[in-house]
Amino acid sequence: MDHLDTDFSLSRRQYPSIPLSTALSDSSTPAENQTLPGLFRILRRRWRVVSIVTLATLVLGILVCLLLTPRYSSLASIEINRAESEESTATPGTGPPPTADEIKMDINTAITILQSDGLALGVIQDLNLISKPLYRKAVDSLEQGKPLNQAPKTQQKAIKIFENNLKVESPDNTRLINVTFSDPDANVAADVTNTLSRRFIENNLERRQKSTIQVSYWLQKELDDLKKQVEDSEQKLANYERKTGLAGIQITGSSTGEGASSVTISPKNTVTERLFGLNQELTAAEANRISTETLYRLVQTQDPEVVLGLGSMSISSAEGGGPGALTADGGIQLVRSLRAQEVALIQGYAADAVKYGANNPRLTQTQQQLEAVRQQLKAELQRISKRAENAYLYAKNNEGTIRQQFTKQQSSANSLADDTVQLQVLAQEAYSNRALYESLFSKLQTASLASGVRATRIDLVEQARPAGIPAFPKWEMVLPALAAASLLFGISSAFLRESLDETVRTSNDLGEVANLTAFAYIPSIQLQGQDESDAIGSKLIHAPKSPFSEGFRTLRTSITLETASYSQKIFLVTSPLGGDGKTTVTFNLGVAFAQHGARVLLIDGDLRNPELHRLFGCEIAPGLGDLQTPVIGPEVKGIVQHAALSTLFILPAGQLREFPAEFFDSEAFASLLASCARHYDYVLIDSPPVLSVADASIIASKATGTITVLRSRRTTRPIFSSSVNTLRKTGTPTIGIILNDVRNPTLDGFHNYAYTRQKGA
């Protein structure tokens, strides 16, 4: 038998220590929703839910988009040019380039201003948007007929609607700001975008002009005060010059490192001029004296090399005509020539000495020439030394004379120092006032120029135009998004429906409830083209190769293997509630055992709603309900043999009793079961639902085992759990579970009951 639960029955025979009442499921088997094939099976089972929800969501989304008012968007681009510094305003473009952070800060500031309530309210008033359909709902009922500037609630609502339709953003790595506005009217969207951009630029210009005017007003006021101070300070300076006679002074200004200014006084009278001249002459004479003295000391060494090293250094008087000078034509050239001759003679003498020997007359001649050159060189050095001495003495005397004149003139200048200090103070005050006046005047001119230059740093690059195609809905984007969302919603609905479904459909559902598994599943009769309520007889007889028939043969094998060690085989076939198909299962299971050669007795124990006799094709009476006394012999009144199967018998329900529970608990019923167990291989009892009445529980306590029938996709897990607990109280083991009316076995985790050779194979 090719059925997944057959292996379980075999395992029970290998391990008889496991109680028959509990068929354990494999706890290591993952849940269906934990595996990819299981998820696909869920989707296949719920394909109708997925299809309906997906289609409904898609249609609803399309209808909503069709009902929505189309919206048009218009775009305007604004460029934020680089900001000029105040120092470079007069010559735009010469300032340092702005950093990335500064550009980003300017753009963020502009975006914030564009999104401000003030600009929004101005645009609403300029275009009278409150009269447009989109903004009519913003009018507050208590402010009907009032101007917009007197209706604060209406203003707030209108601004909110305006901001919801406005989008301001800046593309990366640009100085552009894109202003986008959406409205059902394409012309209104373009007008709003252009008006907002224009008001933003005008607002920026107005703010800068106001700032410039405020600065200019303050500077002008300060300039008036400074002008009076400058006039007063310069008048005081002029009066002091006339008083002290220090007329014709020169004022030189300079700036210090801290930004402050200072002034230097240069008096232009004869005293100071003479003192300055003598100071310069004394400095020059002192330098000349030091130079000539240095030269004189060096020449006194009489060393030709030292003299030649002095070069063309000259020693002269203050007027340049002092006695003696060390120049190229004044002895240096002659010393250089004599020194060269001396070196040449020395070299020649050394060469001849090697060549001719020490007593050669040629050496004597060379020696005499060398002595003559040295005498001439010495005489020339003495003459140079004398000239240097004369120059030194002249420079020394000249320095002394000038120093005497400087000391005399310095005494005259000291008397002028006190007057100069006061003059310095007055001149500093006058210079500072004038410098401050000129600086403020320059700033005033700069501010006036900035109002025309710096205000033009925001440009409207592209004006908004009315759009011809709606921005919403964009069907090329909406339809794929709706399709994806609908499919996702449909799949989610399928899993939600699966998670909310408490019915028993798979073998794993049995394990989740009672740690049980199914002996077999019974395919739906409707799959064979026949309604269960209209079935007369058994398909095991009329269609023995059908999946329905194969399901009962699998069930027969499972029960046979499970109960091989049972001495008596009296089985109660019941279900939690009515309509689960227990009567059909009882009849067809009896047919399956009878076809296998076993003697089978079917007892219709449902004395409230008997149906087994209809499937068997016999009368309802006499039968079980007619039994009054205990059964003594093998003969039981009312037992009917099947027309087609000689080993299949039935005991119909017979007379219906008012209190069936008392009958099943009587000695007569117990004796009946004992007698039947001796004469039949299998006794199958069809009973009422176990949860509806107490009959099934009483019969179960007298049977060898119970077989529970569940209807797939109908019996819920809580109901099944209650029936299992009820049967366990009777102490009778549960032989197995039968999952009935399985409509799609492969989707519920079962195998098909089919094994045929393909045509042509």
Image: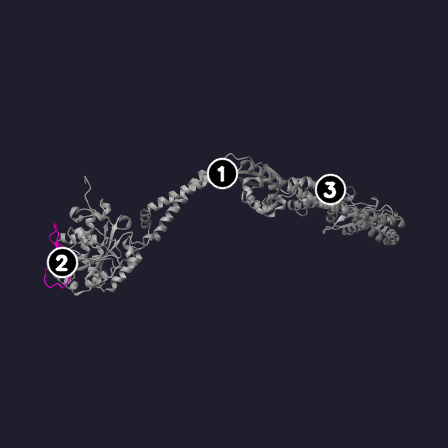
Residue 638 covered by magenta stretch: yes
Asked whether disc 2 touches disc 3, contact meaning CB atoms under 8 Å apart, the reply is no
On the picture, is 238 further left or further right than 679? Answer: right
Q: Could you say where residue 521 lies in the image, as x and y percent from the top left?
A: 23, 52
Mark sitting on residue 445: 3
Residue drawn at x 56%, y 45% as measured from the top left: 138
Q: Amino acid at mark 3?
A: Gln
- Decide if residue 386 is in sight here: no
Q: Which of the 4 image quadrants contains residue 673?
A: bottom left
Q: Amino acid at mark 2?
A: Asp
| Front in this rendered view, residue 671 or 124 | 671
Secondary structure type for disc 1 = loop
Q: Which residue is mark 2?
A: 681
Q: Magenta region's main secondary structure?
A: loop
Where are the magenta residues, as a range? 626-649
- Decide if residue 453 is in sight here: yes
Secondary structure type for disc 2 = loop
Mark sitting on residue 547: none
On the picture, is 408 further left or further right than 575? Answer: right
Q: Earlier in the sequence, mark 2 or mark 3?
A: 3
The CA distance from mark 3 to mark 1 is 54 Å
Q: Which residue is mark 1?
A: 70
Q: Earlier in the sequence, mark 3 or mark 1?
A: 1
The CA distance from mark 1 to mark 2 is 80 Å
Asked whether disc 3 touches disc 1, contact meaning CB atoms under 8 Å apart, the reply is no
Q: Earlier in the sequence, mark 1 or mark 2?
A: 1
